[in-house]
Image: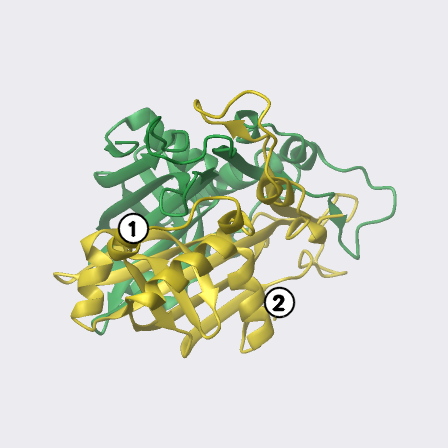
Chain colours: A yellow, B green
């Protein structure tokens, strides 16, 4: 089977550390609610920004409801010689558990961890976070205990004797991320150098180093 | 407010037509379950491939449970002059409703629609789908009646008198998709030309035409 469930912890962390947005799902009045959220892995936890999801995530945390947090990387399209066998290469994880609020000094550290993950190095370039901002920060965390990871990472399925025409090209087209040219804000003076954090981001080869 | 809810139907269709994977959420035994799925918009419906999500989506359909289907495009990272104001530009939609099975001849058309959306032109290059394959195809559809779309598409938030150092660069780094070099399958004879569908995909500028 090319599609499989995996329990590889390194593969889990690589997936979580390589993506930027996940989807948080909770049950509200019997109906599933889903919200996309920026996140960062911090050791054995995933940190999410409560403010983005509004009351929904905070409520789920205070009611100690089980939520699901899903992260998916689409790694390529698989061109088989039939539509039926055509597929996608991907890695996905869904983590289940109860969200915990991260408060006080730990909220400051969590905000920093989120920033370091999403915009590495940026924290050194900007002013310090104020006490008022820390107080207004709503970070939640989910422990990576109950996780389901799946992946397909294989070529096109094909059989030598399946009667299909092998003169038709089959294979995989890998997919990655591309950063565009940075667009300065209105109040950034002309000639202000692009900061190291942005240069590092836009010239990063990961996860594109998997592309040939 | 730079972050807002929108009811623009064209923006909804543009988002759905520009992405490849969504997240389907349903409630199973009181717990939210999320599964990533390839999808295609077909007029006022979203088509999803039941086989990918296994029994979960089919069960939700047969029990006429309300599900949520979320599609998110991350369009860029927003570098403000504080971590607190740093953000992401994105577009997201969540559609709520009851999944309907697409059966018989309509399953054939739905499989073709999924293929044309995910791999435009590929259907003309491969053998026809067999009756057995059509019978094994599980396509579900969700009508786009109850949708919530949100978007942030703006520069870094900044105030002329907020006391922050404007000599620090602030702005947006746009994000797009990058296709890698196609990797032929084991049974594709050396020298087999890359088909038009793959050439079109890997040289497509959409949604990268938003990147400068």
Judge the density around disc 2: few (<14), some (14-19), many (≥20) Cα neighbours within 10 Å.
Answer: few
Residue B37 in percent (x, y) is at 44, 54
Q: Earlier in the sequence, mark 1 or mark 2?
A: 2
Compared with A104, A211 (above or below) is above
Q: Which mark is residue A113?
A: none
Q: Return the residue at label 2.
A: A2
Residue in the image at 37% along x and 63% along y:
A69
Please identify the quadrant where the N terminus of chain B is shown.
top left
Count of number-bearing discs: 2
Compared with B78, A8 (above or below) is below
Q: Return the residue at label 1.
A: A133
Seen from the viewer's position, the closer of residues B170 and B112 is B170
Q: Is residue A157 visible?
A: yes
Residue in the image at 61% along x and 31% along y:
A193
Question: Regarding mark 2 in the picture, which secondary structure is present there?
Answer: loop
Q: Chain of mark 1?
A: A
Q: Is residue A167 left or right of residue A173?
A: right
Compared with A197, A191 (above or below) is above
Please identify the quadrant where the C terminus of chain B is shown.
top right
Q: Is residue B164 left or right of residue A101?
A: right
Seen from the viewer's position, the closer of residues A111 and A77 is A111
Judge the density around disc 1: few (<14), some (14-19), many (≥20) Cα neighbours within 10 Å.
Answer: some
* Distance between mark 1 and mark 2 Cα atoms: 47 Å
Q: Quadrant of residue A89?
A: bottom right
Residue reaching furthest to the top: A190
Seen from the viewer's position, the closer of residues B19 and A70 is A70
Residue A116 in percent (x, y) is at 50, 55
Q: Are marks 1 and 2 on the same chain?
A: yes
Question: Regarding mark 1 in the picture, which secondary structure is present there?
Answer: helix
Q: Is residue A196 left or right of residue B136?
A: right
Residue in the image at 18% along x and 55% along y:
A55
Front disc: 1 or 2: 1
């Amino acid at each position: 089977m090319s599609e499989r469930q995996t329990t590889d912890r390194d593969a889990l962390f690589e997936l979580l550390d390589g993506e930027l947005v996940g989807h948080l799902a909770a049950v509200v009045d019997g109906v599933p609610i889903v919200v996309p959220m920026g996140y960062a892995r911090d050791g054995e936890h995933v940190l999410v920004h409560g403010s983005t999801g509004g009351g929904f995530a905070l409520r789920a945390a205070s009611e100690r409801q089980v939520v699901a947090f899903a992260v998916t990387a689409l790694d390529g399209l698989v061109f088989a010689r039939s539509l039926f066998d055509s597929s996608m290469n991907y890695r996905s994880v869904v983590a289940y558990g109860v969200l915990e609020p991260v408060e006080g000094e730990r909220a400051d550290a969590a905000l920093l961890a989120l920033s370091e993950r999403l915009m590495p190095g940026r924290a050194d370039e900007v002013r310090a976070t104020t006490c008022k901002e820390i107080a207004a920060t709503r970070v939640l965390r989910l422990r990576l205990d109950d996780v389901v990871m799946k992946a397909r990472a294989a070529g096109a399925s094909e059989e030598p004797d399946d009667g299909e025409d092998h003169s038709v090209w089959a294979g995989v087209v890998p997919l990655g991320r591309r950063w565009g040219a940075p667009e300065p804000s209105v109040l950034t003076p002309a000639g202000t150098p692009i900061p190291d954090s942005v240069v590092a981001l836009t010239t990063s080869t990961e996860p594109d180093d998997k592309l040939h």
